[in-house]
């Protein structure tokens, strides 16, 4: 099947062709026709499946079918995302796929000045991509009108709930016209997501590409048992001996990300850290350098990494396992993207055995353990409680309290 069978118009097909996509991914094959039929859709799809184009392409197609209104464009489509990075990425996709169409879009998120966002809304836009907190700020300031919304898309809805955005989402829903098309994308389906879907969606069609809570099959996963103190040494060894050129490394804390990045640099491995304490411009620069191959290793915390779009990322390393098992699925979703094989390596010390067990339970499969010569754990070392256990919880409550996203 090719894109031309999906009911998309010429300007959109031309933009797709320019991207070099030859055929739709499974989620695109399923989602695009349904969305074009104006169905509400509940989609289970992880990052890397092509989900963004899965909703952006039919959304653009819909806009071409709306009657032409005179004057300034009005906001007809609203896409909510959990993080600024994801919002920016969705915004880029809209620009890319909508290149040959006249529609205007804007991306709004917290942590940066609100004025330019107000100004771009003033000029009039058709599509708004937003994180919930900043959107509410703009609504309060009467900078945006939601009464003409025809399409609502919740992207990475599970993340939004994890980050405590449910109340913000409910507030926003109340302001939307009742007649509209709704799409909800989520990598996992907790009871809370089901509740939200029941409230939001009107007789939705359920589509799934990866099995729920299952890691993508094209990702090769391996655990290397190692003592905590020797993780950095092992990581440098793996990067050098396996000649990894582009590695995304996850740490549990911001401080840990900074420290690791500095240590890798000392080992002669180019690296940068991104996390919530870094400015938006520092994050954007680090990401651009990583994408261009100017730095080999990007060290990130879970929250900062959410929504990062990097094509065909070959290696993801869990320097520390996440406290929340679902985060493992999200992390390794960064590799093996759009049909390219990827490898997810976890460096696991004895303290993390319980975390590993929970992850294996969630993905319903054991992960192969491979001991590396020279790094075999010392049996005399006993497990200790993990420091910063509540890091991700702290982050979540911080997100709830502030509307900086
Ligand atoms: P997403 O799951 O939306 O984050 O997309 C993952 C990556 O797949 C993005 O970098 C897209 O550019 C790429 N992609 C999306 N659709 C296709 C396609 N049909 N063929 C090849 N690559 C694609």
Image: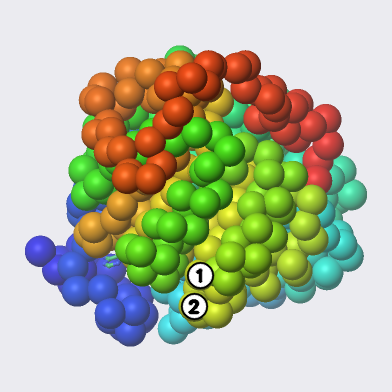
Q: Is residue 120 above or below residue 319?
A: below
Mark 1 surroundings within 10 Å by alpha-carbon count, few (fewer than 14), some (14 through 19), many (20 or more): many
Q: Nearer the viewer, residue 390 or 167?
A: 390
Q: Position of residue 318 (x, y in %)?
A: 47, 43
- Give yes or no for contact between labels 2 and 1 (Cβ–Cβ under 8 Å): yes
Q: Is residue 148 above or below residue 175?
A: below
Q: Nearer the viewer, residue 342 or 14?
A: 342
Asked whether residue 276 appears in the rendered view, the answer is yes
Q: Position of residue 184 (x, y in %)?
A: 44, 38
- Residue occupied by mark 1: 296
- Please name the colour scheme applied to the rendered image: rainbow
Q: Position of residue 343 (x, y in %)?
A: 31, 52
Secondary element at tag 2: loop
Q: Position of residue 329 (x, y in %)?
A: 40, 36
Q: Residue furthest left?
A: 1
- Quadrant containing ligand 1: bottom left
User: Residue at 70% across / 27% down in the picture?
Assistant: 388
Distance Cα–Cα, label 2 vs label 1: 6 Å
Asked whether residue 58 appears in the rendered view, the answer is no
Q: Is residue 297 left or right of residue 130?
A: left
Q: Is residue 402 left or right of residue 146?
A: right
Q: Is residue 49 left or right of residue 260?
A: left
User: Residue at 81% across / 40% down in the picture?
Assistant: 403
- Residue 293 image label: 2
- Give the number of the mark in front: 2 or 1: 1
| Quarter of image, res 129 | bottom right
Q: Is residue 241 above or below residue 354?
A: below
Image quadrant occupied by the N terminus: bottom left
């Amino acid at each position: 099947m090719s894109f031309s069978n999906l009911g998309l118009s010429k300007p959109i097909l031309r933009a797709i062709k320019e991207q070099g996509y030859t055929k739709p991914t499974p989620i695109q094959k399923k989602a695009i026709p349904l969305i074009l039929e104006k169905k509400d859709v509940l989609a289970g799809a992880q990052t890397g499946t092509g989900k963004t184009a899965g909703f952006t392409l039919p959304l653009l197609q819909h806009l071409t079918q709306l009657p032409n209104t005179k004057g300034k464009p009005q906001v007809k489509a609203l896409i909510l995302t959990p993080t600024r990075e994801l919002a920016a990425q969705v915004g880029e996709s809209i620009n890319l796929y909508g290149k040959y169409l006249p529609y205007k879009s804007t991306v709004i998120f917290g942590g940066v000045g609100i004025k330019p966002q107000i100004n771009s809304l003033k000029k009039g836009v058709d599509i708004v991509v937003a994180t919930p907190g900043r959107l509410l700020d703009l609504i309060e300031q009467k900078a945006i009108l939601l009464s003409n919304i025809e399409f609502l898309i919740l992207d990475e809805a599970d993340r939004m709930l994890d980050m405590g955005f449910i109340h913000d989402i409910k507030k926003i829903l109340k302001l939307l016209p009742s007649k509209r098309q709704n799409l909800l994308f989520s990598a996992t389906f907790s009871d809370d997501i089901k509740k939200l879907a029941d409230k939001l969606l009107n007789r939705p069609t359920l589509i799934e590409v990866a099995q729920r809570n299952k890691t993508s099959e094209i990702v090769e996963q391996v655990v290397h048992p190692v003592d905590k103190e020797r993780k950095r040494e092992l990581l440098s060894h793996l990067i050098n001996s396996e000649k990894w050129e582009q590695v995304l490394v996850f740490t549990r804390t911001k401080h840990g990300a900074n420290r690791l990045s500095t240590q890798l640099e000392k080992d002669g491995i180019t690296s940068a850290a991104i996390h919530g304490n870094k400015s938006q411009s520092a994050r954007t620069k680090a990401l651009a350098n990583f994408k261009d191959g100017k730095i080999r290793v990007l060290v990130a915390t879970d929250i900062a990494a959410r929504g990062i779009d990097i094509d065909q990322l070959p290696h993801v390393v869990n320097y520390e396992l996440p406290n929340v098992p679902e985060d493992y699925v999200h992390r390794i979703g960064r590799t093996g993207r759009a049909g390219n094989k990827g490898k997810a390596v976890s460096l696991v010390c004895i303290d993390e055995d319980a975390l590993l067990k929970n992850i294996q339970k969630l993905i319903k499969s054991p992960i192969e353990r491979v001991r590396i010569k020279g790094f075999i754990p010392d049996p005399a070392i006993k497990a200790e409680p993990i420091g910063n256990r509540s890091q991700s919880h702290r982050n979540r409550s911080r997100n709830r309290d502030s509307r900086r996203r």
